[in-house]
Amino acid sequence: MINIEKHYIELTQKLSDYKKINSQNISSVNRKNNIFFNVFLLLQSVCDVLVLLIKLNLNKNINLIYTAPGYCNIKNGKHSDRILSGLNIENRVYINQSKESIIKSIDNYKVYNIGGVIKLVSFFYKKKNSSLKYLSAYSFLNNLILKNYKGKIVYLICYYDANGFSVVNSKYRNKFHLIEIQHGNMINYPPYIYVSDSKIADEFYVKNQGTIDYLKKHLNKNYPDILYQILPYPKQNTTVHKGIHILYASTLEFNGIHPLFMDYLHQVTPQENVTVYVRLHPREKKKKELFDNQIKNLSSTIIFDESPNWLETNSIKNLIIISPWSSVIEEAHDNGYASIIVDPKGLERFTYLLDNKTIYVDSVSKMRNEISRLNTITS
């Protein structure tokens, strides 16, 4: 366990260093610290874990999926899976790993919440920091779950958090086929840069061949037997729309719209006919009011894109994507849309995408020129 803990601490430190950009604006997760909620979370989790263990023992024909609220879309209070939505996975059993939220169901599948039990179990571990306490708690509970799991496949969306790390390094890892599913871009992202000394997953579902090639040369270099599948993108039916249409994809670290793009928006005149669709990062959806206040009294038409999948619902062929470093940039590139990166960290992360339609800018004047040019070549 010592080596696992050391590896986990090194990995989390790399992620922490990576995210220390504009640290004065880094937003925090909306954590629920209300004592009544925590008691309810504990009771709900205890019941869910007990029922889950019974279900796992009685049913072999199930597929286990670890998830969290950030991997879901919410409409009218109901959760739907935004990561596995295009996959035909029957008999799903969802485990919500979150320590802050309860999910009742996803796409009408019952969800088993373990966060309250994780919090309780973590109190019994004497570790030098809280992250190792939670790693130990997740390891204890997931070993119990996976010991009783009679199925053959486990789906994991993130291997490098405490829950994912405990699954990857479980004592019962050889009992099942582990699949990691891409939820953001992997290329040049710290958890996937290094060459792993242990096998992370038996199979990876990713968005493009470039990601497969990258994983084979980096994270999975020592394991040529790992399998890969490319996730299908939704079919699209688009036409050219008059005017300039921009999809702005937010990132957590700025706690609002990137300053460079805000400068552009303040310069836009009504005659330019600019429409901006603001798509919030899943963990920023509760901050809509913050974005609303930033974009008041602008000449552009501002619309919040709250669709489950922007690719699936978009009908604009000449849509231009703008973001500091959202993985939407990679999705846009894969599907032929023009993109503008507005932050140096985005340039570092997406250098491999730069071409005539995926551009980096560092000034408002360059941004205006590129928007005009890209709108011309895509119309």
Image (cartoon, rainbow, N blue to C red):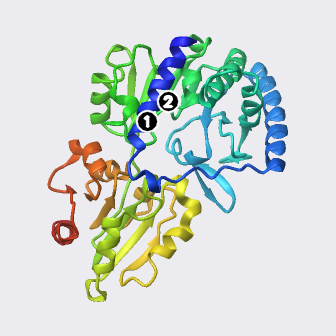
Kind of residue at badge 1: Leu
Q: Give residue 245's mark.
A: none
Who's the residue at 53% across and 57% down the image? 284
Give the mark nearest the N terminus, 2 or 1.
1
Quadrant of the rendering where the C terminus is positioned: bottom left
* Front label number (2 vs 1): 1
Kind of residue at badge 2: Tyr
Residue 272 spot, x, y in % from top left: 26, 83
Identify the secondary structure beneath mark 2.
Answer: loop
Who's the residue at 14% across and 55% down the image? 356
Q: Which residue is mark 2?
A: 160
Quadrant of the rendering where the N terminus is positioned: top right
Who's the residue at 53% across and 45% down the image? 85
Identify the secondary structure beneath mark 1.
Answer: helix
Residue 111 spot, x, y in % from top left: 71, 40
43 sits left or right of 355 in the view: right
> Is residue 21 placed above or below 198 in the rendered structure?
below
Which is more toward the observer, 270 or 295? 295
Residue 257 spot, x, y in % from top left: 41, 65
> Is residue 12 placed above or below 33 in the rendered structure?
above
- The answer to the question of whether label 2 and label 1 lie on touching residues, with beta carbons closer than 8 A, is yes
Q: Which residue is mark 1?
A: 15
Distance from label 2 to label 1 (Cα)? 10 Å
Residue 371 spot, x, y in % from top left: 22, 69
Who's the residue at 78% across and 21% down the image? 58
241 sits left or right of 63 in the view: left
Can residue 251 be seen in this snapshot? no
